[in-house]
Image: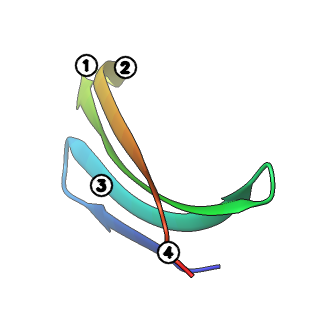
Amino acid sequence: MATEVCRTEDTLLYDVVQDVAGDTVRVVGSFVLRDGLIWRHTSLAVPVDG
């Protein structure tokens, strides 16, 4: 499965294709850090056709 991660000093972005319950999905998200702790997390899962 494909995985891509991009980082800056306080942000991590990810894009992953994985198998979930027999279906292939693309998961895209982010973590934003403040004072070394996760301040905000976002994610989106989208089914992959075919």
- Name the residue: 36% across, 38% down: 43
Structural crowding at the residue carrying mark 4, measured as other residues with C-alpha within 10 Å and reported as few (<14), some (14–19) or many (≥20): few
Closer to the camera: disc 1 or disc 4? 4
Mark 1–mark 4 distance (CA, rounded to whole Å): 40 Å
x and y percentages locating residue 10 in the rendered image: 20, 41
Report the residue marked by disc 2.
37
x and y percentages locating residue 34 in the rendered image: 22, 21
Residue 37, above or below 11: above
**Residue type, mark 2 in image:** Leu
Report the residue marked by disc 3.
13
Q: Which one is nearer the viewer's eye here, 17 or 9?
A: 17
Residue 37 quadrant: top left
Mark 1–mark 2 distance (CA, rounded to whole Å): 6 Å
Q: Could you tell which of marks 4 and 2 lies nearer the N-terminus?
A: 2
Closer to the camera: disc 3 or disc 4? 4
Report the residue marked by disc 1.
35
Mark 3–mark 1 distance (CA, rounded to whole Å): 18 Å
Specify the farthest residue to the right.
22
Structural crowding at the residue carrying mark 1, measured as other residues with C-alpha within 10 Å and reported as few (<14), some (14–19) or many (≥20): few
Structural crowding at the residue carrying mark 2, measured as other residues with C-alpha within 10 Å and reported as few (<14), some (14–19) or many (≥20): few
- Name the residue: 30% across, 54% down: 13
Helix, strand or loop under label 2: strand
Q: Could you tell which of marks 1 and 4 lies nearer the N-terminus?
A: 1
**Residue type, mark 4 in image:** Asp
**Residue type, mark 3 in image:** Leu
**Residue type, mark 1 in image:** Asp
Q: Which one is nearer the viewer's eye here, 39 or 28?
A: 28
